[in-house]
Image: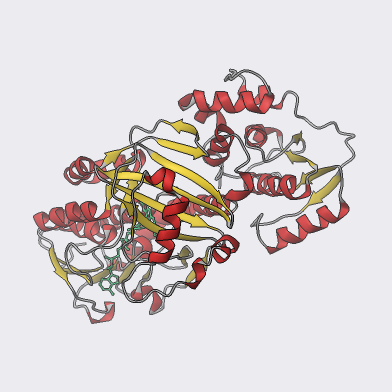
């Protein structure tokens, strides 16, 4: 469809990238981006862009990607538990300052002929345009105005986003135990003299440390919390301060919408959906939405058909990532319960937390980490045996006649209220062993393994997890990452995708 005039609401990654791609595809169309902030006054620190995303951006617009890469900083990934460090090589992961990313996207949008208007905050209904691309972020007023069947779920944990004035050597995940509880940072370098520090904790720790009492107004940062966290992470900060920029504690908001369009208005990026920051995919989703939306607008004869095509293309990928992000969020929210693991086994637990990275694939790219973890698991020298799954399972299949209390619970959230009741009932029975059983499908098995991990920690019994023969790899990963003591390989095959 040839469009005459398109209004883009929001000049973040989704809006700017969609505007440029649209103007390149339809040079005769007038494309205007309306952004509430002034130019060069964005919030935030660095964001990460993984290799897969970069490949998609390259195919859509090689010029823009070249400049993003030039402004970005590649880094490996490490886990640091009390000075014990596990490292995963990751050549193609780059960190980039949000300011730099937006600068690149603004320049390329303008180069293509897009008009950028800063310091304006129009409502979608007031814009004179054939279609309105609403890319107005996680707090989208367009979405809030209704018509999209939106819902927002709040995470249990608390996090804040801040920075430091030096470049870490690598990305680092580091928990620190304090008298109040555990804080963990996900930190990564994004410029020669800058790193992002994303710090999270659980509610009891947050309250015990009196971080819930800060009064922060306007655009100020929570300086009391930053001072507290500077002490908590002083080893990792190497004497530097934490820098705030409208920094304050938040609970992650997972946004879902039953429809992404209403009339001539279509949502994209965080306005339409969010995925927990621990899978580093917010910018990826925003820019990939832009690619698909512009392709659909170009291919279809009218806006409703284009919006339907865009949603049909993007929704499955977005929902898959949101499910990975949900599992990842639950893993991070329960992180303090597993910091006793040796760092290499903790890294395996991290890599397998959402079920999308098989243990043997991880072993192929990071044999040192997996070898060390397998050695710790089996009490032998570090090694990566060729028949990894068989090797892990060999001595860990529970005997059929093991006297165990059976736990048969189908749950969505292994750390939710229903799970609390299951764990309390098991603890009250004080069994020597528990056998956790349930449906054969893969999502159910992954959840069962998480519940089993909780039962191991909180009940202290030997925990057996049952799963079907075709999901032996997941059972093996569950054993190495400390989610189960023993497994039972039983029943029919488990169909069902990695969720
Ligand atoms: C703590 C944290 C860490 C993150 N880490 C990563 C990471 O490592 N990797 C990653 O890829 N992503 C990360 N993200 C997510 C990422 O920042 C967002 O997902 C991404 O920026 C979404 O892009 P967007 O264009 O949809 O929205 P935004 O970037 O939020 O842009 C929306 C824009 O719309 C403007 N706006 C809002 N309302 C109006 C209005 N009414 N009128 C005009 N303008 C308006 C806003 O000012 C803003 O500029 C992180 C997010 C958080 C909170």
Indicate the colouring scheme. Answer: secondary structure
Q: Residue at x 72, y 46 (%)?
A: 457
Which residue is nearer to you in this view: 463 or 488?
463
Residue 103 visible in the displayed image: yes
Q: Tell me where residue 246 sits by quadrant.
A: bottom left
- View quadrant of ligand 1: bottom left
Which residue is nearer to you in this view: 65 or 429?
429
Q: Residue at x 44, y 56 (%)?
A: 229
Q: Position of residue 47 (x, y in %)?
A: 33, 50
Q: Residue at x 47, y 68 (%)?
A: 258
Q: Position of residue 159 (x, y in %)?
A: 46, 59
Above or below, 244 relative to 379: below
Left or right: 335, with 85 as reference point = right
Which residue is nearer to you in this view: 354 or 261?
354
Residue 288 visible in the displayed image: no
Q: Position of residue 104 (x, y in %)?
A: 18, 51
Above or below, 440 relative to 471: below
Left or right: 61, with 222 as reference point = left
Q: Residue at x 41, y 78 (%)?
A: 146
Q: Position of residue 297 (x, y in %)?
A: 26, 60
């Amino acid at each position: 469809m040839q469009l005459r005039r398109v209004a883009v609401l929001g000049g973040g990654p989704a809006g700017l990238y969609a505007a440029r791609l649209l103007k390149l595809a339809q040079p005769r169309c007038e494309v205007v981006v309306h952004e509430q902030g002034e130019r060069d006054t964005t919030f935030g620190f660095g964001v990460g862009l993984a290799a897969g995303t970069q490949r998609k951006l390259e195919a859509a617009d090689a010029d823009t990607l070249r400049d993003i890469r030039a402004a970005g900083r590649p880094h490996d990934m490490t886990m640091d538990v009390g000075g014990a460090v596990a490292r995963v090589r990751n050549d193609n992961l780059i960190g980039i300052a949000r300011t730099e990313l937006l600068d690149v996207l603004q320049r390329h949008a303008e180069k293509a002929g897009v008009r950028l208007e800063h310091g304006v905050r129009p409502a979608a209904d007031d814009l004179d345009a054939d279609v309105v691309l609403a890319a107005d972020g996680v707090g989208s007023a367009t979405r809030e105005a209704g018509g999209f069947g939106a819902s927002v779920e709040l995470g249990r944990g608390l996090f804040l986003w801040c920075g430091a004035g030096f470049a870490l050597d690598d990305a680092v995940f580091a928990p620190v135990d304090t008298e109040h509880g555990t804080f963990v940072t996900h930190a990564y370098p994004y410029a020669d003299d800058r790193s992002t520090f994303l710090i999270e904790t659980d509610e009891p720790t947050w309250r015990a440390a009196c971080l819930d009492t800060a009064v922060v107004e306007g655009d100020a940062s929570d300086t009391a919390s930053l001072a507290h966290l500077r002490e908590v992470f002083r080893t990792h900060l190497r004497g530097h301060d934490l820098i705030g920029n409208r920094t304050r504690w938040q609970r992650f908001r997972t946004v879902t919408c039953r429809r992404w369009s209403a009339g001539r208005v279509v949502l994209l990026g965080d306005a339409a959906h969010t995925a927990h920051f621990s899978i580093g995919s917010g910018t990826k989703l925003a820019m990939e939405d832009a690619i698909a939306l512009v392709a659909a607008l170009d291919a279809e004869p009218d806006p409703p058909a284009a919006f339907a095509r865009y949603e049909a293309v993007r929704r499955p990928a977005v929902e898959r990532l949101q499910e990975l992000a949900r599992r990842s969020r639950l893993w991070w929210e329960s992180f303090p319960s597993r910091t006793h693991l040796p760092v290499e086994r903790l890294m395996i637990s991290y890599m397998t937390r959402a079920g999308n990275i098989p243990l043997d694939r991880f072993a192929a790219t990071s044999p040192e980490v997996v070898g060390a973890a397998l050695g710790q698991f089996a009490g032998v020298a570090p090694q990566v045996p060729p028949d990894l799954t068989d090797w892990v399972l060999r001595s860990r299949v529970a005997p059929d006649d093991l006297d165990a209390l059976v736990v048969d619970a189908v749950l969505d959230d292994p750390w939710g209220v229903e799970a609390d009741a299951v764990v309390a009932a098991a603890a009250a029975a004080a069994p020597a062993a528990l056998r956790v059983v349930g449906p054969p499908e893969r999502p159910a098995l992954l959840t069962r393994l998480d519940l089993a991990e909780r039962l191991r920690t909180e009940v202290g019994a030997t925990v057996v997890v049952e799963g079907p023969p075709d999901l032996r790899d997941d059972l093996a990963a569950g054993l190495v990452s400390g989610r189960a003591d023993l497994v039972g390989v039983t029943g029919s095959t488990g169909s069902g995708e990695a969720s």
